[in-house]
Amino acid sequence: MWEVFIRSKAGLDHKHAGSLHAADAQMAMENARDVYTRRMEGVSIWVVESSHIHASDPDQASSMYDPANDKIYRHPTFYNLPDEVKYM
Amino acid sequence: MTVHSFQEHFDSLIDREIAIEPKDWMPDDYRKTLIRQISQHAHSEIIGMLPEGNWITRAPSLRRKAVLLAKVQDEAGHGLYLYSAAETLGVSRDELYNQLHTGKAKYSSIFNYPTLTWADMGAIGWLVDGAAIMNQVPLCRASYGPYARAMVRVCKEESFHQRQGFEIMLNLSNGTDVQKKMAQDAFNRWWWPSLMMFGPPDAESPNTVNSVRWRIKRLTNDELRQKFVDVTVEQAKILGLSVPDKDLKWNEERGHYDFGVINWDEFWNVVMGNGPCNKQRLETRKKAWEDGKWVRDAAMAHAAKRKERKAKAA
């Protein structure tokens, strides 16, 4: 099983498109072209064996992202500036 | 978390319209319902190639042949998107194929009707794909992420399928008397089975309540069927063809067309395996799978050889 990532045009990220079965990387690439880019959906394809992907556990999400939760000062809107200040 | 709180968490995600993803906890019945629905849909795409494959070599022009090939190729693709989505729920591709080949899993019963004339390619695109789109557009917002994403892709591609079908019907209805008759005949044969595609009436649809609760389905079978009738009757007027239903009548009060009683005995009979082509479709599919075995074996052998060669060269 392989995961397919497609860059839709130069300058954009590769984005997950779906998955497929293949015997090796070359076949995965050929299949990805036939299955996921029949209408010029991409200019570049990545294929990754699904077993090589390590995913975070959604049940741990609250503790996983907890450290970022109370740091609103990382966002620009946290700072109150007078309206007269321009270009900032 | 206890099972109870898992369930509460799941329900709250559903209620807040937050997508469920493969690694999220989900109730067993939700998983089972999805596997059944997604795989049935995938099987329908695969079997759906057969009635049209029948006409590829006999398409009336090179343009029509190229179009029909592209449509059938899309259907193979749609089957693959959907099988992959089902696999994220923990069922294997082999198991899904096995369910199809042993008759344990169903596919849309519309594909058990024969394609007798070229006009059937028009009627299938216009009506069968039209009904499928009506069904599928709300599924792009289904609660299970991989399914919804697959459906977005399917719907984007499906639109040309319906338009090319309507175009075939339009050409035939503007053609000679024989061609017009052929179009009307195809319409007569595909109209009722298309209405059946939306499934049994709500009152007799055992799966609807849960599917709506879980936001797998957004509209009920009857709601979708009515929508389909309302838009398709208007399209038939443009073709100058008459809808084969003597009870069809605009209902001012409801703002919808009233239509005749559907022959549900026929529907269940086809579902049970007694349609005109059930046996033939399944046999063709199984034969294709068995005849393709050497290709799969050769691909694996080739990949192994390639790997070996690479190892030697390194």
Image (cartoon, coloured by chain):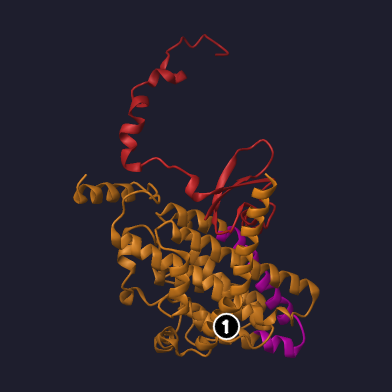
Residue A32, given in percent of the width and then of the height, sits at 62, 55
Tally of numbered tags: 1
Q: Nearer the viewer, residue B135 or A73?
A: A73
Q: Quadrant of the C terminus of chain B?
A: top right
Q: Hey, which quadrant is residue B170 in on the image?
A: bottom right
In the rendered image, the vertical position of residue B71 relative to residue B279, given as above or below: above
In the rendered image, the vertical position of residue B158 relative to residue B169, given as above or below: above
Residue at 46% from the left image edge and 57% from the top image edge: B147
Q: Nearer the viewer, residue B234 or B99?
A: B99
Q: Hey, which quadrant is residue B214 in on the image?
A: bottom left
Residue B78 in view: yes
The answer to whether residue B117 is magenta is no
Chain under disc 1: B
Which chain is red in the rendering? A
Local crowd at mark 1 within 10 Å, few (<14), some, or many (≥20)? few
Q: Quadrant of the N terminus of chain B?
A: top left
Residue B32, given in percent of the width and then of the height, sits at 34, 64
Residue at 46% from the left image edge and 54% from the top image edge: B146
Residue at 67% from the left image edge and 58% from the top image edge: A38
Q: Name the residue beneath numbered marker 1.
A: B284
Q: On the rendered structure, is B159 left or right of B105?
A: right
Residue A18, given in percent of the width and then of the height, sits at 54, 53
Q: Amino acid at mark 1?
A: Thr
Residue at 70% from the left image edge and 86% from the top image edge: B180
The answer to whether residue B160 is magenta is yes
Residue B162 in view: no
Q: Nearer the viewer, residue B174 or B130?
A: B130
Q: Colour of chain B?
A: orange
- Magenta highlight range: B154-183
Q: Secondary structure at mark 1?
A: helix
